[in-house]
Amino acid sequence: MKDHREIAKELDLFSFHQYAPGAVFWHPKGWTIYKTLMEFIRQKIEKDGYQEISTPVMVKNQLFKKSGHWEHFGEHNMFNLAVYEDEEIESGKIPTKDIKGLKMVDVNYSLKPMNCPESAIIYSARHRSYHELPIKLSEFGILHRRELSGVLGGTFRVRQFIIDDAHLFVRPDQIQEEIHKLILLVLEVYKSLNFTPRFYLATKPDKAMGDKKTWKEAEKDLQRTLKDTKVDFAIKPKDGAFYGPKIDIHIKDSQDRDWQLATIQLDFQIPQKMELSYTDKDGQKKRPVMIHRAIFGSFERFVGIITEHFQGAFPVWLSPIQVIVLPISDKFIDYAKEVKDALGKANIRTDIDERNETLQAKIRDATLQKIPYLVIVGAKEQESGKIAIRTRDGKDLGQMPVNQFTNKITEEIENKS
Ligand SMILES: [Zn+2]
């Protein structure tokens, strides 16, 4: 079994460079997989009333001090910067801090490690009424976390990544229904990837924010919803987030390794810290509850996992190149181009191998590139206006007209096979 970095190199998916430790350089093919997964999530959630937002990457660290991340997430796990305006520098009043006996300029900015507090800013940008809730804000924001360089390992542990993140701002009476919908969403998404999710309820950690009673009630809420949705689950004691209990969802890959991917977290604390409110039916100002959720988690890690899971032979819908056209000789390049254009018009990602190589060599290389379908065109095909098809596993599917093949692939892409 190959490591995802080795597969990525062979298939030209992504790479790393010493200039940016722990950050991925996505090559066109790898980025196609990334974008396809992102689009998949976008399509799934837009039906359910989510609205996508985008918030700044570099923000004043006061925000994280206010939200509680500075204290609980740890300032040492963030990238912090000293960014002062010219006027501040000229005034000579730049704050300093003693670090290991050295007097250093104090940091005032951070690269965001999470999207939550900034989603809260958008929520509170205007007055909210009870009938507007739930408000569901999704964000594919670039996040940075300061992992030590020694623990970095391919895309599994990186310093820069994007999560398929969303924050739901709900009334207390909407918690169960929204959690229920999220569990169903997770089940649906994983089913289309043939993963069987396992659910865990993670309870109050020792270093938690908020009172015991609220925690107990929140844990009960999650437990009840899991039972009502009829999914089996186990308890992960003391493994909740600092702001609330959560449901973690794990999968097993083709090598029987266990991965925690999705998470659904209930949060009563950040709404309080960020002073969020809505006007209820009775005209009273109330505090919304925040639900944090991700389905794939970090795309970087998820692409790494599925690269190893499929050993580079991605299902058709995720394959960066879905079809390659192989002309038997130079004489058939024009017909091969016609075929490629027809497939391209049907939004099938198609390549063509125009090299002056033998058909055997072209088939071997396309197979090594794990391209799902190989279309071979020669005299017979050109005369009949058909194409000959092989799979990457060496199965011969015989000849068929281009439009019949197009329909077949389009159906496979739609069915996520
Ligand atoms: Zn969050």
Image (tube, rainbow, N blue to C red):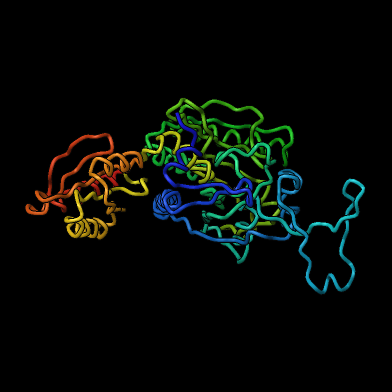
Q: Position of residue 6 (x, y in %)?
A: 48, 37
Left or right of 301? Residue 413 is left
Q: Position of residue 45 (x, y in %)?
A: 43, 51
Residue at figure coordinates x 73%, y 32% from the top left: 206
| Residue 48 in sight from this viewpoint | no
Residue at figure coordinates x 39%, y 40% from the top left: 188
Q: Position of residue 380 (x, y in %)?
A: 9, 49
Q: Position of residue 330 (x, y in %)?
A: 20, 55
Left or right of 225? Residue 375 is left
Q: Quadrant of the C terminus?
A: top left
Question: In this view, which residue lies farthest toward the left?
Answer: 384
Question: In this view, which residue lies farthest toward the right?
Answer: 101
Residue at figure coordinates x 64%, y 52% from the top left: 19
Of 90 and 201, which appears nearest the observer? 90
| Residue 95 in sight from this viewpoint | yes
Left or right of 168? Residue 85 is right
Residue at figure coordinates x 42%, y 40% from the top left: 184
Q: Quadrant of the N terminus?
A: top left
Q: Quadrant of residue 112?
A: bottom right
Of 148 and 392, which appears nearest the observer? 392
Q: Quadrant of residue 125?
A: bottom right
Of 359 and 393, which appears nearest the observer? 359
Tag count: 0
